[in-house]
């Protein structure tokens, strides 16, 4: 079934229901939202010759028109290729060329016209609207099959060229239904705030709110600003949002200064990177029972595990800290295993690679058979993430397999060292990497962003680690930086750090 059917059904049920907001200002009802999407679909078909299955790229910042474009693309049966707006023009051009997109929507053509690949039409929304008065709305969404491609999701490319993850209608249906079962209910009076890029996780979470007829809000800034969000949420009420852990720590810092306690917030779903135990404890102490954690990848969008609101708030279970440090249990639509390199299951508590199977797992990588064969094996998605399952099914992430440090033949998981260092009050952020060592193979190095008026010394941090972790896991060197390099989604670029500090 075409994803645009969900929008059409909600619009038919309640066409006057408020739908799209820029900050506090409503810009479209559901009836208007659906009509605009149908007109965009018509314009794509008649003006650009877009056929069902063709790819259409969106390379622009968050805005309410972003959602209109997505549904317009689906309305005519095409495939959406959302591209993060913070990428360089040439990076975006690579994705457009790789996906063989027929049209690319942008705001402000700039240099894009010079690097746009042949065969792709550039539609600058600053110069021309997505549809005109003579573009009569399509009567209904183009029929699509469950296995038809709907969203071509490009990985962040921190270790090389980004790959196009092929997500079908059925993949996104499964993700949507699992949200209601495993993550959170969605209420008609909710307001989904898109503070993270719509090109990725935040955008994937639009479907649940379209189904329930909730409000869709893009902050006036177009992105995440902690002060703006804390002022906006009490005015909107019943706010839900997807946030990277770094966004939560920034919101927490602002809230502590202003006294904001989460008024107006209903649910913050966090994921997309490691949430350290100390950070989620501090966040729940400040904001209360407003958090749900998900763990997923583009290859199984938002749908590997979930740690419920109840689990996050529970302080009575004898292993509550272990559970709070985990990423929860398998979502209802997937099976999760932790395995050795040969695919045999690890025992509870043993570390191995996390693999998954189920309805939301991708069809494969776009025009990349080799990468598909390496990642999808015998029906299982090999995630590249290392973790362990306990006897109750709670999954604890250790690290990406490529980030594990092997020193003297022993595996050291950077996240464990990072967790230990973050319990020191003088540490604001830390990233732990391995660097070559002629005797041990690799040694542990910590890159630290300090907090407070009196930064800790390397000797103080080393003494602190002695009280937290085994001696062989302690960093052999500390580097102090003003900030850590991150990609557009808040993930620390460990590849950059390894290159920078390999020989230092």
Image (cartoon, rainbow, N blue to C red):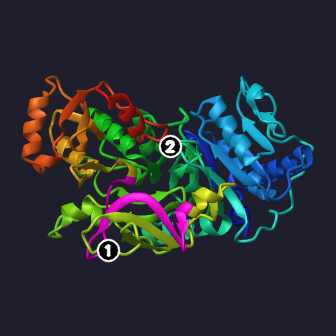
Indicate which disc residue 196 carries.
2
Mark 2 neighbour density, 10 Å: few (under 14) some (14–19) many (20 or more) = many
- Which contiguous range is marked in magenta? 374-401
Give the quarter of the image for residue 465: top left
> Which residue sits at x=72%, y=23%?
110
Judge whether 484 appears above or below 73 on screen: above
388 left or right of 208? left
Q: Residue at x 33, y 32 (%)?
A: 502
Residue nearest the viewer, comparing 314 with 305: 305
Badge count: 2
Q: Is residue 484 magenta?
A: no
Q: Main secondary structure of the magenta part?
A: strand
Helix, strand or loop at mark 1? loop
For residue 425, side relative to residue 226 (left or right): left
Question: Where residue 90 sits: x, y (%)?
Answer: 66, 31
Dot label at residue 479: none
Quarter where residue 252 is shown: top left
- Between label 1 and label 2, give the one nearer the viewer: 1
- Which residue appears at 75% of the width and 57% of the height? 74
Marked residue nearer the N-terminal end (1 or 2)? 2
Q: Secondary structure at mark 2?
A: loop
Q: Is residue 303 above or below residue 54?
A: below
- Residue 158, image x and y in percent? 49, 41
Position of residue 465 relative to residue 183, above or below, is above
Find the distance from the CA under tag 1 to the CA under tag 2: 30 Å
Q: Quadrant of residue 426?
A: top left
Q: Is residue 126 visible?
A: no
Residue under label 1, please give it: 393
- Residue 287 percent across, percent down from the top left: 29, 49
| Frontmost residue, 23 versus 224 | 224
Answer left or right for 308 relative to 104: left
């Amino acid at each position: 079934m075409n994803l645009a059917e969900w929008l059409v059904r909600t619009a038919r049920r309640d066409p006057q229901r408020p739908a799209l907001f820029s900050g506090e200002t409503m810009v479209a009802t559901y009836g208007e939202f659906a009509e605009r999407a149908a007109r965009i679909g018509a314009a794509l078909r008649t003006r650009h010759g877009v056929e069902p299955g063709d790819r259409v790229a969106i390379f622009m910042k968050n805005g309410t028109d972003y959602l209109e474009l997505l549904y317009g693309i689906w309305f005519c049966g095409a495939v959406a290729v959302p591209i993060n707006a913070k990428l360089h023009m040439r990076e975006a051009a690579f994705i457009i060329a790789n996906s063989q997109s027929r049209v690319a929507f942008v705001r402000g053509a700039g240099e894009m016209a010079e690097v746009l690949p042949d065969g792709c039409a550039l539609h600058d929304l600053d110069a021309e609207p997505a549809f005109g008065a003579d573009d009569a709305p399509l009567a209904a969404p183009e029929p699509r099959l469950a296995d038809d491609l709907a969203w071509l999701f490009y990985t962040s490319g921190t270790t090389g060229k980004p790959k196009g993850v092929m997500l079908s209608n059925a993949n996104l249906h499964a993700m949507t239904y699992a949200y209601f079962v495993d993550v959170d209910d969605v209420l008609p009076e909710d307001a989904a705030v898109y503070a993270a890029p719509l090109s990725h996780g935040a955008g994937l979470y639009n479907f649940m709110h379209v189904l329930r007829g909730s409000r869709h809000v893009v902050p006036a800034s177009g992105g995440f600003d902690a002060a703006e969000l804390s002022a906006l949420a009490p005015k909107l009420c019943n706010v839900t949002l997807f946030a990277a852990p770094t966004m939560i720590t920034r919101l927490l810092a602002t809230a502590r200064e202003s006294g904001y306690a989460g008024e107006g917030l209903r649910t913050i779903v966090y994921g997309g990177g490691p949430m350290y135990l100390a950070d989620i404890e501090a966040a729940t102490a400040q904001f209360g029972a407003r958090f749900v954690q998900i763990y997923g990848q583009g290859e199984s969008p938002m749908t590997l595990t979930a740690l419920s609101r109840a689990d996050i708030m529970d302080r009575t279970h004898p292993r509550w800290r272990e559970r709070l440090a985990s990423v929860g249990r398998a979502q209802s639509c997937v099976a999760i295993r932790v395995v050795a390199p040969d695919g045999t299951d690890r025992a509870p508590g043993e570390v191995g690679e996390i693999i998954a199977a189920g309805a939301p797992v991708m069809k494969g990588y776009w025009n990349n058979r080799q990468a598909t064969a390496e990642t999808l094996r015998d029906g299982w998605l090999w995630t590249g993430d290392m973790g362990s399952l306990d006897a109750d099914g709670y999954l604890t992430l250790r690290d990406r397999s490529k980030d594990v440090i092997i020193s003297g033949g022993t595996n050291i998981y950077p996240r464990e060292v990072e967790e230990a260092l973050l319990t020191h009050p003088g540490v604001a952020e830390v990233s732990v990497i391995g660097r070559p060592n002629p005797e041990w193979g690799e040694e542990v190095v910590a890159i630290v962003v300090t907090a407070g008026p009196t930064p800790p010394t390397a000797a103080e941090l080393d003494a602190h680690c002695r009280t937290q972790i085994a001696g062989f896991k302690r960093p052999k060197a500390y580097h102090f930086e003003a900030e850590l390099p991150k990609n557009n989604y808040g993930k620390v670029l460990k590849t950059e750090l390894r290159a920078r500090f390999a020989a230092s």
